[in-house]
Amino acid sequence: MKKEEQNDARNPIEGLLRMDRMPHIWCPGCGIGTVVTSFAEAVKKNNEDLNKLTVVSGIGCTGRVAGYVKLDSFHTTHGRAIPFATGLKLANPDIKVVVFSGDGDLAGIGGNHLIHAARRNMDILVICVNNFNYAMTGGQVAATTPKGANASTAPYGNFENAFSLPYLVDAAGATYVARWTCLHLRRVTKSIQEALNHRGFSFIEVITPCVTLYARRNRLGDGLNLLKYYYDNSEIQHGADTKTLDIDYQGKLIVGKFIDKEKPTFLDAMDTHLNEVIGDDYQLYGRLNDD
Amino acid sequence: MKKVKADPKGVLTGSHYMDGDFALAEGGLAAGCRFFGGYPITPSTETAERFSERIPMVGGVFIQMEDELASIISMIGAVWGGKKAMTVTSGPGFSLMMENIGLAAITETPLVIANVQRGGPSTGLPTLPGQQDMMQARWGSHGDYNIIALSPDSPQECFDLTIKAFNLSEIYRVPVFIMTDECIGHMHEKVVIPPAEEIEVVERKWYTGPKDKYLPFKLDKDGIPFMVKAGDGYRFHITGLTHDERGYPLLNSKAQDIKVRHIVDKINDNADKIIILEEEDIDGADIVVISYGITSRVAFRAVQTARKAGIKVGTIRLITVWPFPEKLINKLAKKVKAFVFPEINYGQMVREVERSSAGQTKVFPVHHCGGGVHNPDDIFKVIKEAAK
């Protein structure tokens, strides 16, 4: 290929990417890039103001997303993306805050923050890329690893129970909850579009292949084999009872939008309550200021 | 550095009878703090309570987070969202904050944390005083970095130094700690809050140049980079990884060398401007008693007794504890017979005196392992011993 031709071959979502940071670190066959593409599509379709959209990540493979999106973006410490996002959102209610991180970061080390942000109905969107293991550190067992799967710190197979993330965040108070695999590109995009417009705590779990570690160690083949597994075993059940969403090793994957409801956000509740109790002395804060 | 008058909304002008913990909250409000990410812990909780009660009338947010890990990082988020932020804690909570103090240091995020110290380690003595987190304040997070720490000796100083702490944090883009203790925290005294127009507040060092030219970590002439906040169209990146001027990760020893030297040296190079202390009768003194916080009030009594006994005693009260006034101590070490250093721990800041003295004079620590303040007689005995 001639040089000029190469320059013409542009990535369709490069307006949203820090092209000066490419190539990215993700492995061939990894699903994180697909989720970033869905995110970029959703942002484009929603016509989001890129100056008012912020991405916060923790640590891990998915934690690198913040470094690649050309937005105000924060790569924080392990497990702490959600409370960082909480502070950011409360300090500047005009911006939309998206937490983009992995299962180990959000549900393992950061699990406490996950449930509390859901409980408060903090107005942020959490995109959790679930690859069933700690990938950045070499494929260790996670809070989401299905029972029976092998991991580098579960070399005889995992015997712990796994979190069902939609059930967890639903129980904690999330007001938008969906799960997809990264094979469901358009549905992930649509969910992100909806969640970006949803006021309150939104949680989208996207199951993705970790080809280098989880799949290799469990002899599940390459990226295509895993997408085939998603294709054969995913079942869309919108509105399914979140109690029924456990994932067995190489078992059925129930996907869909499970929760989409209205409830006052943290800031709405704060403004309404304090205004009512304190009266005129209360200095309205946050979105109610604009009303 | 842009100095402005305090926003009158946050300033409770007048004479008050309040404790040190409340004064910390009032100092924060006067300094323009509009975000408090709290977590209750004895003996600091009253500050969070006061803030939660006052902030609705001032215009800002108080949120009680789920733990101290969350409270500190919510502050870092709030600062990048454009607010001034503070929190308050005590030993166990301070320990939990350490990792993200490192994040604040490497991302040069200005914020203020007050540590109302209690006896440790572990749960230790929740309701009783200590000065046992002094080294942790300086070295507690992993890696090389620097911070500023101030130590008030009264509720009035809790108010005054909180404003000072915010100003220093904005000038140097650094975490600033107020290292107080249970005794000062729960001590009720007169606190005079001046009118807003008499309170000088340092504004954040906002960048105002062209948007596409902004580099988050490019040093300005004064050695400190400009700041922006999320939502203003800069589309900038901040990471806890070692990074270059653009804020992009750059993982090699050269980038590390530049970053580490910068975040350490920006404080060391300005130490003379940052250090505040009170000296008394230093000239011609045989013995100099060095102290900080509540211990300086107790030491005062011992010094009076020693003077009555004919010993020539001078005093130094450290108001800034970090950076440590090593030049002054080194100079004095050539002249005095000995330094006496009482503190409520088993030997922490006294190591700095030993290091700064460099063997030129004797250094006598007066240990107290926490749970109370020194008996002035114990300090006097050591002064007498040192004067022999």
Image (cartoon, rainbow, N blue to C red):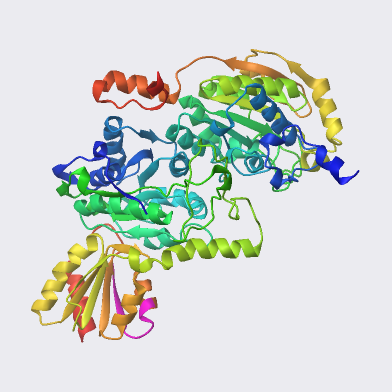
From this view, report whether residue B329 is shown above or below residue B37. Answer: below
> What is the number of callouts on the image?
0
Where in the figure is residue B161, as x and y percent of width and height? 27, 54
Residue at left offset 54%, top offset 62%: B260
Which residue is situated farthest in the right direction here?
A1
Question: Quadrant location of the C terminus of chain B?
Answer: bottom left
From this view, report whether residue B132 is shown above or below residue A21. Answer: below
Quadrant in which residue B57 is drawn: top left
Instruction: Please provide the residue range marked out in magenta.
Output: B356-367
Where in the figure is residue B205, as x and y percent of width and height? 42, 50
From this view, report whether residue B330 is shown above or below residue B77. Answer: below
Q: Is residue A209 part of the magenta span, yes or no?
A: no
Where in the figure is residue A172, as x and y percent of width and height? 52, 24
Which residue is situated farthest in the left direction here?
B308
Quadrant in which residue B303 is drawn: bottom left
Where in the figure is residue B304, as x and y percent of width and height? 12, 72
Residue B124 in view? yes
Residue at left offset 63%, top offset 16%: A258
Q: Is residue B114 left or right of residue B67?
A: left
Q: Nearer the viewer, residue A279 or B82?
A: B82
Residue B346 in view? no
Question: Quadrant location of the N terminus of chain B?
Answer: bottom left
From this view, report whether residue B65 is shown above or below residue B350. Answer: above
Q: Is residue B365 part of the magenta span, yes or no?
A: yes
Q: Nearer the viewer, residue B222 or B261?
A: B222
Q: Is residue B145 left or right of residue B150?
A: right
Residue at left offset 39%, top offset 66%: B270
